[in-house]
Amino acid sequence: MNYNNEKIKKRPRSYFPENIDICKWENVEVELKKLEVEETNSAEGLIKFLEKFTELSNILNEEQAWRYINMTRFADKPEYEKKFNEFYAGVISKVKPYKFKFNKKFYDSPFRKELDEKKYGHLNRIISNDIELFREENIPLKVKEQELANKYGSIFSKLTVNYKGDEKTLSQLSIYLKDKDRKVREEVWYLRLEKMMEKREEFNQLFDEMKELRIRQAKNAGFANYRDFMHQQKGRFSYTPSDLEHFHCAVEKEVLPFLEELTEERKQKLEIDSVRPWDTSVDLDGKTLKPFEKTEDFIGKGIDILHTIKPEFGKRLQMMKNTEFLDLENRKGKAPGGYNYPLVETGAPFIFMNAVGLQRDVVTLLHEAGHAMHTFSMKDIRIEAYRSTPSEVAELASMAMEFISMDLWDKYYDDKNDLLKAKKEQLKGSLEFLPWCMIIDAFQQWIYTKPDHTPEERENSFVGLMKRFSTGVDWKGLEKFKKIMWLFQLHIFEVPFYYIEYGISQLGALAVYRNYKKFGKEKALEKYEDFLKAGYTIPVNELYEKVGIKFDFSIEYVKELVDFVKEELGNLE
Ligand SMILES: [Zn+2]
């Protein structure tokens, strides 16, 4: 490979000087004020105006990106957090009103009507949607809502339990739910739930406060309820809330019977009377997969896999490595989690992870690599709105890569049985996720379409959904804990209605994989790349069509995909 030492280079700017110091607000403000009074006298001028602002926005975004990356890489060094917050408060948050003004300028321009419908129709729709939903009076409500959302995060992260002499957070405790010893799992499960139970009232009150703020925002914008408001605000133009209700039903009818079989299999393999909530994560053969030991190996094989899929993909990841755009291994002082952060000016991303040598890390790397390929592919899109992919699209890019790469995971496994196990987990996992995803969506739909409920009615509604989407796990005697399971799902508090996108993308990723198997690698990849390159220049349903799949939540379609998973699992036996 002749790109062994090649590094990623920053691209030259078209409109702004290379030496502009954007860390000083005065400098940024001068440029924004110039843009504010810039006259646009034609349809082309209008587009050029947006491109110009996008370039400035790219410069600012990239600075923010590095500050975020450093903050998470060195989470134990408060100076990085300070630097991030300074830039955010001092520059980024002050740019926001200008962004609105510029979109409004676009919206109000007489030349907007002259734009080529085919090329810019979708842009028009995205920006118009934002402008039409904007309400001055919602700004303070949004600020208050954000404060309360942060409060959830801060209370939750401070919940600790003393376990075997150590202070552990609830997230740290959850790894023991994979312990081979059933007693350990049960004990830990109770510890987590009892801790959460102490916060039940506090979290419910907090949620009620947030709910009221959200309902007021919806009313201000002229909506009958917050669900419909959020649907519109999230730009879900390609489907309706009632389409999602069909998705719920499809999972109930087509996915649950298969998952019930898996629960039965689990019961037999673990030799237990019934599968209790603490029995659902433990490995059935008691063995933990070990795909790699050294980070160097982890990255090298990842590059190798991408290279085999398509040389250009491998080259990109190799160049990220050469440029030190990867920080993959778990280390003291790093923030938890993983992400692909686009460096939009450069046109490449940074990948952050906490790999510890598990199969999960392999999937995460390939998932983030899917996001990374998306970032590279979109780098020539010169209008920000056309690059800001909604999650149904972004997660399809990443989840599809998990499946596309699956046949090459043997690079991490010498033992054929290990490879088979990893593949089976991936296939089963894709369906196992769906019931919980539906519960979280259906629950929020209920909450905001029955806004006058009491906390007790809310809990009952949640329990009803847990029963509706049961996969045969035995909750006998645990009813009081069942009621509070939703308190663990931060999205309900912090990012309402953001969750179903993962279910939509999961279906999409399975469908892409099915094409890969059916029509061969070449054809499926070609479409995958066309999809990546398109960014968000066309609506979600058209992007799904571009990658060669349907945008569909019907029972028939879900059944087809469940059958496909079963068939694939059968082939692995
Ligand atoms: Zn992702």
Image (cartoon, rainbow, N blue to C red):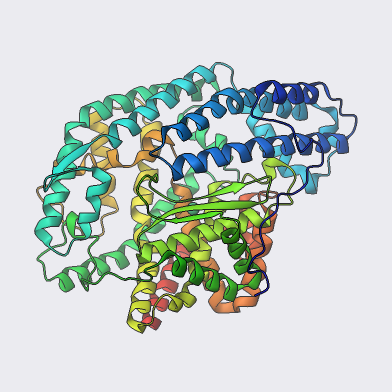
Q: Position of residue 162 (x, y in %)?
A: 14, 42
- Looking at the image, residue 243 lies above or below residue 148: below
> Can residue 106 be seen from the camera position used here?
yes
- Looking at the image, residue 438 lies above or below residue 313: above
**Which corner quadrant holds the N terminus?**
bottom right
Residue at left offset 56%, top offset 74%: 516
**Which corner quadrant holds the C terminus?**
bottom left
Q: Position of residue 542 (x, y in %)?
A: 65, 55
Left or right: residue 161 versus residue 204 is left
Q: Position of residue 10 (x, y in %)?
A: 71, 49
Judging depth in this view, the residue of 277 and 251 nearest the camera is: 277
- Looking at the image, residue 332 lies above or below residue 286: above
Left or right: residue 469 versus residue 14 is left
> Can residue 507 be seen from the camera position used here?
no
- Looking at the image, residue 425 lies above or below residue 246: below
Left or right: residue 403 versus residue 544 is left
**Numbered disc total:** 0
Residue at left offset 59%, top offset 17%: 136
Residue at left offset 47%, top offset 64%: 556
Q: Position of residue 16 (x, y in %)?
A: 79, 35
Judging depth in this view, the residue of 304 and 527 nearest the camera is: 304
Judging depth in this view, the residue of 439 and 90 nearest the camera is: 90
